[in-house]
Amino acid sequence: MAVPRYLTGDAAGIKEFLDKFDVFLFDCDGVLWSGDHLFPGTVETLDLLRSSGKRVVFVTNNSTKSRADYKKKLEALGIPATTEEIFSSSYSASIYISRILTLPPTKRKVFVLGESGIEQELRSENVPFIGGTDPTYRRDITPEDYKLIAAGDESLLDPEVGVVLVGLDFHLNYLKLALAYHYIRRGAVFLATNIDSTLPNSGTLFPGAGSVSAPLVFMLGGKEPVSLGKPNQAMMDAIEGKFQFDRARACMVGDRANTDIRFGLEGKLGGTLGVLTGVSSKEDFVEGDVRPMVYLDKLSDLLAGQ
Amino acid sequence: MAVPRYLTGDAAGIKEFLDKFDVFLFDCDGVLWSGDHLFPGTVETLDLLRSSGKRVVFVTNNSTKSRADYKKKLEALGIPATTEEIFSSSYSASIYISRILTLPPTKRKVFVLGESGIEQELRSENVPFIGGTDPTYRRDITPEDYKLIAAGDESLLDPEVGVVLVGLDFHLNYLKLALAYHYIRRGAVFLATNIDSTLPNSGTLFPGAGSVSAPLVFMLGGKEPVSLGKPNQAMMDAIEGKFQFDRARACMVGDRANTDIRFGLEGKLGGTLGVLTGVSSKEDFVEGDVRPMVYLDKLSDLLAGQ
């Protein structure tokens, strides 16, 4: 396996590398910022790429935010961005449902386990849904519920539901899991915005979207959802469908070998760029099973190439 | 593999079989009753065994009920029983924690994901605990919680917790999962009352205790809890520890090959008896990988042996 090229401090190498690409797909946390801390030089680096005519796309598995929410988050950190530059797993899932899945006309409704980001993106694609942040579902299961669910009563199990979409749900509960399970048993397509097991916050880890689908996978005897987030290629297909770029002229930038770099490699992008400001270490990039084409100490090292 | 003997209608065979055992361990749902429906002849069959000097033990993975609760359930169905005859996974877990686990004196507290059955049994063994049905934990996670958990703040992470015990929790939520995960990361022993993926109710299936531990297993990269329910032998050891019986003179009775019959076989009991009033079919018993020694159409067929 090729050893990735280390480009920090190599101005000519950086310039040559940048010239190969028209599109840069960015993982965000660990690359542009960490938690609430913007890395120095992030804004200038993005400016350099944009002013050189490159397209910049922010690719995030965060399903709790819509693209509009995420734009606000970027701007709050000081990064100018347009909604069009943002590609989230909630948007990816919405596109997949509206444009790729073929559902019978009577089975177009989505039962959502997740937060408002998913709801907003489903609305933007005119996909009908139930569940999500509806407070009706934020309650304990009752003895009556068991009977109604067992009987397939339409007051609890909407016969138009043809998809169960699971993202990160901070309001996960027993009733929602029971309903999602029964919808899938009755034939609904099982989708996940992403299956990250954990969610970084405050320098440690919390349950991720994959922990919300895990009980369903276990109840269903190991049946996995189709994931619309990194590193699943359904997300790359959706990005390409939207931006119509040449994969050979695109580069994925990320801090995690096993998700970001894998996502770019399996997507057969022209390049992959690893940075050492996040999860993966130099050893991961240089000796691991999944290696980027080039790597840098930090993203802003690209500024040497201007 | 031996073909199990079919004893329905074979009075001499039944009598010979019954004479081999002093102790009968009973799975309940699917054997003695189904849902709220008591099978005809259940009470008479138990009477026959008791009047012949056999010990009867009701073995249940239901962790939401204490033995006292379960006795009430049996009596409501018309089955006379004493608390001493009942062995539940919540009791099994409590015995394991109090008598088998060796915990440092400063790490004896249990963080419970589950209902009052577990709490009552922990109290009966004088095991200190937090979590469980405490309404303090039945709330949304807040931005402040992330910081406090990340900092290991004692207001949220009790430093005396040395065990996380997961059972069926109808009030499962994100905060409790986050806390359980952090306790385990900080070194707490990961236990489950049982890991049944589903719970039968009203003729269909709902999330079981194993679906409550599944998100934690996923977050922990596949680390499984020690399960104190069937078919795990920790439960058999606990039953034997309590009743001091001769395994060669004990018989496990159940409707499920893969849990009940497996439990008896792996526990090296003298006998296993399958009944066809529950999950497993005749084909499962006769041609499956896990086969009972004998099987009956229904439990009350034993009455022919008196």
Image (cartoon, coloured by chain):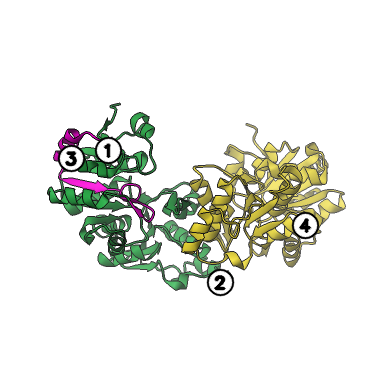
Chain colours: A yellow, B green
Which residue position holds label 1? B265
Residue B66: percent from the left, percent from the top?
Answer: 31, 62
Q: Amino acid at mark 3?
A: Gly
Residue placed at 66% from the left, 38% from the top?
A: A4
- Mark positioned earlier in the residue sequence (3 or 2): 2
Q: Chain of mark 3?
A: B
Mark 2 touching mark 4, by CB under 8 A? Answer: no
Q: Which residues are magenta?
A: B9-38
Mark 4 touching mark 1, by CB under 8 A? Answer: no
Badge 3 marks a residue whose secondary structure is: helix
* Pointer 2 and pointer 4 on the same chain: no
Q: Chain of mark 4?
A: A
Q: Which mark is residue B144?
A: 2
Which residue position holds label 3? B305
Badge 1 marks a residue whose secondary structure is: helix
| Other-residue count near label 4 (Cα within 10 Å), few / some / many at <14 / 14–19 / ≥20 | few
Q: Amino acid at mark 1?
A: Leu
Give how far apart the Cα atoms at labels 3 and 1 are: 24 Å
